[in-house]
Image: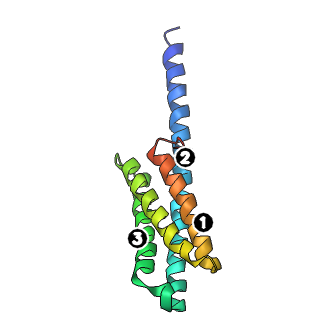
């Protein structure tokens, strides 16, 4: 029986670790998608010019692309600080979404805002160990 108990513990640990890996993989994919969306949106905004290309809008988009890229790196290497980085990334994504939502009549920026919100939620879940807050 003593052999059974360690095996059961090992199985339980693998199950927990597996769920964490699934959650992390989902967060990595969201961050990658958000990064790409924001990068394309920068080009769109610069092409539109005027109020689309103001410093605050471009900065919000670039901050989001960088934050997502850094967050992916932290998660891929399972850095002990990845949860804190995910928390910061969620805040940056939320700020970018707010900035993009000012252009509700523009489909590209509307799609970007929605993607930023999805990424922020995914990062928040990672920051809190996979639990919604």
For mark 1, what is the residue? 114
Residue, x 50% and y 76% (percent of image)? 39
Q: Is residue 29 left or right of residue 91?
A: right
Residue furthest top as drawn: 1
For mark 3, what is the residue? 63
Dot placed on the residue nearer the N-terminal end, 3 or 2 = 2
Q: Are marks 1 and 2 in contact (CB under 8 Å)?
A: no
Q: 120 or 11: which is nearer to us?
A: 120
Q: Are marks 3 and 1 in contact (CB under 8 Å)?
A: no
Q: Are marks 3 and 2 in contact (CB under 8 Å)?
A: no
How many neighbours does mark 2 have within 10 angstroms: few (below 14), some (14-19), or many (20 or more)?
some
Whole-percent x and y of residue 12? Answer: 54, 26
Whole-percent x and y of residue 109? Answer: 58, 76
Q: CA distance from mark 3 to mark 1?
A: 16 Å
Residue, x 55% and y 85% (percent of image)? 44
Q: Does residue 10 show up?
A: yes
Kind of element beneath mark 2: helix
How many neighbours does mark 3 have within 10 angstroms: few (below 14), some (14-19), or many (20 or more)?
some
Q: In the drawing, what numbered circle is on residue 23?
A: 2
Dot placed on the residue nearer the N-terminal end, 3 or 1 = 3
Instruction: In the rendered view, tell whether residue 56 sits above or below residue 17.
Output: below
Whole-percent x and y of residue 28? Answer: 51, 56
């Amino acid at each position: 029986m003593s052999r059974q108990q360690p095996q059961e513990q090992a199985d339980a640990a693998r199950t927990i670790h597996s769920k964490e890996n699934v959650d992390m993989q989902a967060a990595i994919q969201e961050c990658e998608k958000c990064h790409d969306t924001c990068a394309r949106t920068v080009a769109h905004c610069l092409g539109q010019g005027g109020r689309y290309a103001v410093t605050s809008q471009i900065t919000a988009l670039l901050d989001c692309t960088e934050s997502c890229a850094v967050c992916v790196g932290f998660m891929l290497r399972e850095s002990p600080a990845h949860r804190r980085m995910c928390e910061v990334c969620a805040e940056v994504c939320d700020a970018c979404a707010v900035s993009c939502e000012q252009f509700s009549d523009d489909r590209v920026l509307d799609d970007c805002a929605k993607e930023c919100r999805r990424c922020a939620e995914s990062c928040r879940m990672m920051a809190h160990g996979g639990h919604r807050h």
